[in-house]
Image (spheres, rainbow, N blue to C red):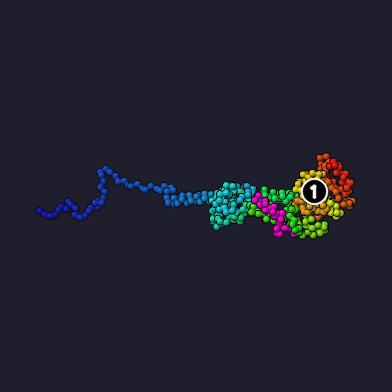
Amino acid sequence: MSDERPQGEGVPTGHAGPASHARRLTPGATQVAPPPPPPPRPGRGPRAAFAIVFLLAIALLIAAVGVVAWALGPADAGDPRPVTFEVPAGASASRVAADLEAAGLLRDRRALLAVLRWRGDQGSVGEGLYDLSRDLTVPQLADALVRGGRPPTARFVLPEGIRAAEVVRRVADAAWASEAGALEALIADPPAELRPDGLPEGATLEGYLFPATYELPLRFDAHAIVRALVTRFEREANDVVRAELDRVGLDLHGWVTLASMVQAEAANDGEKGIIAGVFLNRLDLGMPLQSDPTVAYGLGKDLPQLDFPGGDFDIDHPWNTYTRPGLPLGPIGNPGTAALVAVLTPTRTDEAGRAWLYFMHGFDGTAPVFRPNVGFDDHLRDVARYLGR
């Protein structure tokens, strides 16, 4: 047999024909291309996600800024009315912030604490009284608290002509009940530092506790309170006044004593000049002053309690200006400015130049009447007419 194969009957081993890599297809099938990938949906890409996060962050930041601005703002921008607020001694910043919030002066206590902490002032809140308002911002409140408040005070009023015993009662009732005994002792026997220049040895401070409205710190003791009252009197007894005393012939104590009598006798300021003139004229003539309020004071009575024309006027004591000549031992109350000035600027004569020596208070029907006179007969006539005596 021959090893040769017929031409075209086979393919040499190891050689692939052109169709060797073609996909074999099932008879009748057609070749289909794979579908393209879907396009990216809007907002799902990396850039869109970053934009969303960024916008959320901005929104949160704006909201946070709004909350902070609200918390730092005034509790009520339209309410400027002052509110007295007290910070007790030793109060912490946390307690003060809570109290401010409770008082409606602060929206959120945490805002104030944050501002104080940021400034390093958390331990610098001062005790005392503050005049705050609801239109203050938190930084403004913080500024006020760090500056410190005024000391807590109490207020009392001393009317003109008030006696020392009543001064003690009013001061004690205001806030210093525990100081009443000390007040009485200091007024009755004042130490050197409380004695006005010109106060005689052994004299009390009756007459030198100037009548006015006072608002004093609660920490004041009796000594400080009396000092405040006497200091106010010394403003009246300035150098100009003391120079005038020589002109009218009185020393300081005589001036205050006579002014206290004028204060007690006068029904109004308009009468004080003539009443001072009557007393000064009588002193010049050596006539007894015969002032009813001096008798009442020496007996520890109020003027309506005198038993006129009974025996009270016959009881001799250092204030009885019926039984003793000249001025009484000392003031019978604490005179005000008008009475003190009246003694320095008295009306001593009538239009004809005659010296006033008498005066009286009575009634014309129901209307009060003040009648000064230069003669005793005219005085008796007016007593009969307006007092029915």
Residue at 64 percent of width and 52 percent of height: 218
Q: Mark 1 points at which residue?
A: 315
The answer to if 226 sits in the magenta stretch is: no
Q: Is residue 270 at all visible to an observer of this figure?
A: no
Give SS at disc 1.
Answer: loop
Query: Residue 150 location in percent, x, y?
Result: 63, 54
Q: Where is residue 139 in the image (x, y as percent from the top left)?
A: 58, 53
- Residue 250 in the image: state x and y as whole percent: 81, 57
Q: Nearer the viewer, residue 331 or 99?
A: 331
* Left or right of 40 in this view: 63: right
Q: Which amino acid does label 1 sit on?
A: Ile
Question: In this image, 172 relative to 112: left or right?
Answer: right
**Residue extent of the magenta highlight:** 177-197
What crowding class fits label 1: few (fewer than 14 Cα within 10 Å), some (14-19), or many (20 or more)? few
Could you say which is closer to the camera, residue 275 or residue 289?
289
Quick check: 333 left or right of 218? right
Image position, residue 332 (x, y; %): 76, 51
Count how many numbered circles sit on residues in the image.
1
